[in-house]
Amino acid sequence: MKGFSEKVLCWFDQQGRKDLPWQKDINPYRVWVSEIMLQQTQVKTVIPYYQRFMQSFPSVEALAKATQDEVLKHWSGLGYYARGRNLHKTAQQVCDQFTGVFPTSLDEMQHLPGIGRSTAAAILSIAHNQQHAILDGNVKRVIARVFAVSGWPGQSVVLKKLWALADELVPDSRNADYTQAMMDLGATVCTRTKPACGNCPLNTGCLALKQGNIADYPGKKPKKAIPKREAIMLILQTVQDEILMIKRPPLGIWGGLWCFPQFDHHEQAEQWLLENYRLTLDNATVFDSFQHVFSHFKLDIQPYLLSLKRDNPTPLKLGVMEADDQLWYNINTEFNGGLAAPVQTLLNRIKE
């Protein structure tokens, strides 16, 4: 489309967002944190997390020196926790390998943990005004509609077309503004549902609008039945109001977060309780079950609360950290670590 970038920049000057927290005191560190947080997460959700994160970790050096527990505590509730773990790893790599200064080449940037081609391009474009195309979800939607690129962007042939167009459309100047403008346009005007086509600067040349089938672009991901899994969570509480917490393995679901002892089947939970505490689920208070939805499956959680008496056998000394991956947490104090969302919900229920 002739004048594509000029129209986008003109719209941005008049209607684009310019007061977001990460648009102030711009530097690669601040831009990088915002871009990682904004992956698959809306701006309004990210803002308070970003502000708290920046207050606690104002520089890449501060983030690198923090513990993973401290980082994941600030990430609790944002979801997709691999982002938080990768953020911590990248900060350490930037300090160790680049003396605390983010690389300025696209190739080096996208070899850091958790940073792909589009994220690397966005950081370099916004922080250094470098001439790079981005292709996040919002930009994919805008380009797919304007140029009627059919098919699901997750397919390599479709993605290749979108990248070719994105590269071609990048302006010769004002690349930082253009990058922000394209993200804003997709987030606020060319939205997934009910796009405000009347307010779009590209509406006169938008092929999807001319065809009258905007909803067909971009193509939808082929539907799959979302599998369901089950989990038993055991909440062991002492008379001193201490709760047994277990740290999850570093990778996988809730990697590095603190949870309750969790089992796939009642039989596993019963055996563990009997061997360690001479208790059965018959001794438990049964909480209402609930469902937690991940991107690729649904988890049905059945919590049980078990009150431990003073004469119960205790493999762990109450109130004492016995290992790096388990502890007794007093619910009347602040927890210094990352908590999985369902665990936080259950702890709140117990406190109430």
Image: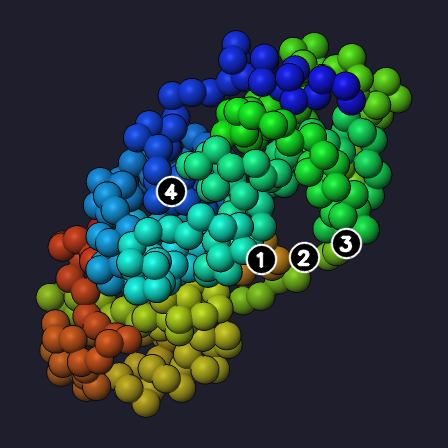
* Residue 81 shows in this picture: no
Amino acid at pointer 4: Pro
Q: Residue 97: give x, y in percent of width and height.
A: 35, 64
* Residue 44 shows in this picture: yes
Q: Nearer the viewer, residue 37 or 324?
A: 37
Per the model, the C-alpha gap separating discs 3 and 1 is 28 Å
Res. 156 mark: 3
- From the image, tell me which residue sits under label 4: 28
- From the image, tell me which residue sits under label 2: 226
Quadrant of res 260: bottom left
The residue tagged with tag 2: helix, strand or loop? Answer: loop
Per the model, the C-alpha gap separating discs 3 and 4 is 30 Å
| Disc with the residue nearer the chain's start (3 vs 4) | 4
Q: Are marks 2 and 1 in contact (CB under 8 Å)?
A: yes
Amino acid at pointer 1: Lys
Name the residue: 50% across, 76% down.
265
Q: Which one is closest to the eye, mark 3 or mark 2? A: 3
Amino acid at pointer 3: Ser
Res. 323 mark: none
- From the image, tell me which residue sits under label 1: 298
Q: Are marks 3 and 1 in contact (CB under 8 Å)?
A: no
Q: Nearer the viewer, residue 253 or 185?
A: 185
Q: Nearer the viewer, residue 158 or 318?
A: 158
Q: Nearer the viewer, residue 273 or 264?
A: 264
Q: Which one is closest to the eye, mark 3 or mark 1? A: 3
Label 3 Cα crowd, 10 Å radius (few <14 / some 14-19 / many 20+)? few
Quadrant of res 47: top left
Q: Are marks 4 and 2 in contact (CB under 8 Å)?
A: no
Per the model, the C-alpha gap separating discs 4 and 2 is 38 Å
Per the model, the C-alpha gap separating discs 2 and 1 is 7 Å
Horizontally, is 267 left or right of 192 in the view? left
